[in-house]
Image (cartoon, rainbow, N blue to C red):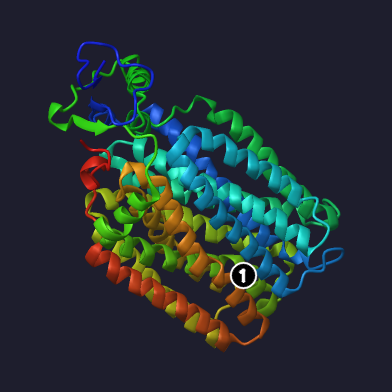
Amino acid sequence: MTSRVEGQAGAQAPERVAAGTVIETDISARLDRLPFGRFHTLVIVALGITWVLDGLEVTLAGALVGALRKEPMSFSEFDVGLAASSYLIGAVTGAVGFGWLTDRIGRKKLFFITLALYLMATAATGLSWNIYSFCLFRFLTGAGIGGEYTAINSTIQELIPARVRGWTDLVINGSFWIGAALGSFLSIALLRPEVIDPAWGWRIAFFVGGGIGLVILLLRTWIPESPRWLVTHGYAAEADRVVSGIEKRFTDEGITLPPPDEKRRLKLKVRSHTPLSEVAGAMFVTNRRQTLVGLALMIAQAFFYNALFFTYALVLERFYDVPGGDVGWYLLPFALGSFLGPVLLGRLFDTVGRRPMIAATYGISAVLLAGVGYLFQLGVLGPVGQTAAWMVVFFFASAAASSAYLTVAETFPLEIRALAIAAFYAIGTGIGGVSGPLLFGTLVETGSRDWVLVGYLIGAALMAVAAVVGGIYATAAEGKSLEDVSKPLASA
């Protein structure tokens, strides 16, 4: 037993000790000294699948535009943007509501609540009968995914060793694009008249998404509650059992674990919850610099990604006469470039460092976006060339976007981590993500390449500002324990 209640040394801690009691623990040190192993790989797979689902949802919605604009749905281009924004508004709502709950009742419980909401809502989307029902179900689907973001990002940070936290976080967030590739393939298969009636193909695509969610629900049953959350909320004995179980996975494989660093033992005062006044103080007073950085990164990447990706199918149809059933082929290169970016660049965030890599990925993305937008305005690229150019842009932009989630997840105290992720996701998505698709949908509908270029330049400017802010003010968190990056509010 390596966590003890102050004043009860030598005695086993009760299942839950009273709020205000001081607990001394080395839980964090024990987790960070673990080698990267099979357990962590399983965590990546089981939790990263959330982003696969999100990628599937976003891509399906984009690739199925052609089918939704036909009978019986008959969506206009504005309707397409409205549906995209409904999904994002739902994600914002779910992130805030479930983020608050995640910090209060734990990470694991929220896994199941939010995923269950997702699978029911996405299946219901396949039963939509008009734009209003479609937007309602997209809103609820987004709420489930938004809630997943907060619980999953918190757990990733709290289970993965510090020395590989950056790469792991970027890869998990980048797995969004595995879902994007899957969504592209589904749309290609299900929108072929020779395969299935297109009027039913888009509905089946959403049913498949719900089915995948059900499988994932079963896969997650083995994931433990975050030991860091447990000990902070007074469950010292349970936290020890969880960590001992993780350690046993390694010793059973013949790995000898080094002793935890005794200098990293923490004294924490147990709390049942964190008052909102303390949350506000932590975000806007104690950590106001981190708040500035988080807002800049999240707003820029949300506008960039949601504006471009949600509306690319419209661009292909309006400016390149690409049939709706073929859009999936053009989204696949997007997915490939965007997944390879975090995988290949992610390790540099742990070695070169957070600040230089944030500045580099955001800055390069800004320059490339402006350049490719200019080529689009000139009309010198066909649909294949334009897509290849976006593939290069998104290689860097995907790593940048994933680093935004890494930054806001690791630079705030454990007690408010999920709510902080939710707040930044909500603000970033609310300002950049919701406005982006609506703006671009309107710009594309004008049929003017000049106006679409204006949208691209707005995205480039936001990414450039984020590059400067992140490069100067971001926290150099590489290789550091979460508790060293941001001291727990419960520290005694």
Q: Nearer the viewer, residue 93 or 385?
A: 93
Q: Nearer the viewer, residue 358 or 224?
A: 224
Residue visible at 35% across and 55% down in the picture? 280
Residue visible at 74% across and 52% down in the picture? 125
Residue that sits furthest to the top in the current view: 11
Q: Secondary structure at mark 1?
A: helix
Q: What residue does disc 1 label?
A: 311
Q: Quadrant location of the C terminus? A: top left
Residue 376 image offset from top left, x and y in percent: 54, 81
Q: Quadrant of residue 38?
A: top left
**Is any atom of residue 183 visible in this view?**
no
Q: Nearer the viewer, residue 259 or 326?
A: 259
What's the residue type where badge 1 is placed?
Thr
Residue 42 image offset from top left, x and y in percent: 45, 31
Residue visible at 39% across and 32% down in the picture? 226
Q: Label 1: few (<14), some or many (≥20) within 10 Å?
A: many
